[in-house]
Structure formats: C-alpha cells, structure tokens
Image (cartoon, rainbow, N blue to C red):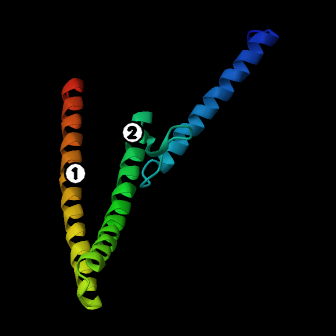
Amino acid sequence: PAPTLTPSESESRSLRLSQLRAAAERRAYSSMVGSLPGSSASLTGPPSGGSAATVASELDSASHAAATALNMILLPVTVSFVLYMLSVRFLPGSSEAARAILCVVGGAGMMGVEMLLFVIRSEAVIGEEGRRRRKAERRTGK
C-alpha cells in the first residue's frame, strides 16, 4: 500500500518533480547545443558559458580592439591634415602636389608607427594571458 501524503507533502513533492524536470530539460538542451561553436551551453549563464570575469575580459578585449581600430584610422588622417596645414604655413612656394605627397607620406608613416605599437601591445596581452593560464593551472594542479 502506498503511503498517504498530506497536502503540504504532496505540494512539495510536485514542486520537487517540476524542478527535476526543469533540470533534466536544461541538461538535455546544454548537451544538444554544447558542441555548437559560440554557443553558451547554458540557458541562464553569461555568453560563452564562462564566468562574469570571462565576459568582462571579452568585453574589455572588444573595446580595446575597437579603440585601436579607430585610432589606426583617425591618427593618420589627423597627421595628414596637420602636415598639410603646416606645409601651407611654412612652405608657401610649394605646389599642391608636393603638399599632397607630404600628407600621404606623413599619414603612411604614422600608420606604420601605429601598427608597430599594436603588434607590441598584442604580444604583451598574449604573454599576460599565457602567464595567467599557467598560474591558474599551477593552482589547480593540472
């Protein structure tokens, strides 16, 4: 004979069963989408299935990349404009073609400097990430 349940026990049992069904559904969903590239594999977690620190790191990386791209575009344009204005002021007898060449060379030179600085910064970031990963591996003993 099955035991008789009080209404509160019956209610708590049905609540527990619904929680277990929801957990099973989440597990099934996670296993279904877990192998997809870029999937979060979680219904409620942050993107990439990572922690809040991982999401903050990804956001910081994206904002750094956007700032670098904007800087690589605006700085050569600004340098070209400044060089043109300086050539008008300090080289009054020069032709328009000579001023344009000066602007292009100056802008290209500044873009080269920016690219060099970008490569140096990227190497520093990659090295720091490697150090963090090795330190975390030592802590966990892997």
Q: Nearer the viewer, residue 26 or 116?
A: 116
**Mark 2 Cα-neighbour bin, 10 Å: few <14, some 14–19, many ≥20:** some
Q: Going 20% across and 57% down the picture, which residue do you hit?
A: 117
- Where is 11 relative to 50, above or below? above
- Where is 124 relative to 136, above or below? below
Q: Quadrant of the N terminus?
A: top right
Q: Nearer the viewer, residue 4 or 117?
A: 117
Q: Measuring from the top left, give residue 84's x and y in whole percent.
A: 30, 77
Residue 134 found in image quarter = top left
Task: Identify residue for label 1.
Answer: 121
- Where is 30 relative to 120, above or below? above
Task: Identify residue for label 2.
Answer: 54
Q: Going 24% across and 76% down the picture, which residue do you hit?
A: 90
**Mark 1 Cα-neighbour bin, 10 Å: few <14, some 14–19, many ≥20:** few
Residue type at mark 2 is Thr
Alpha carbon of mark 2 to alpha carbon of mark 1: how far?
20 Å
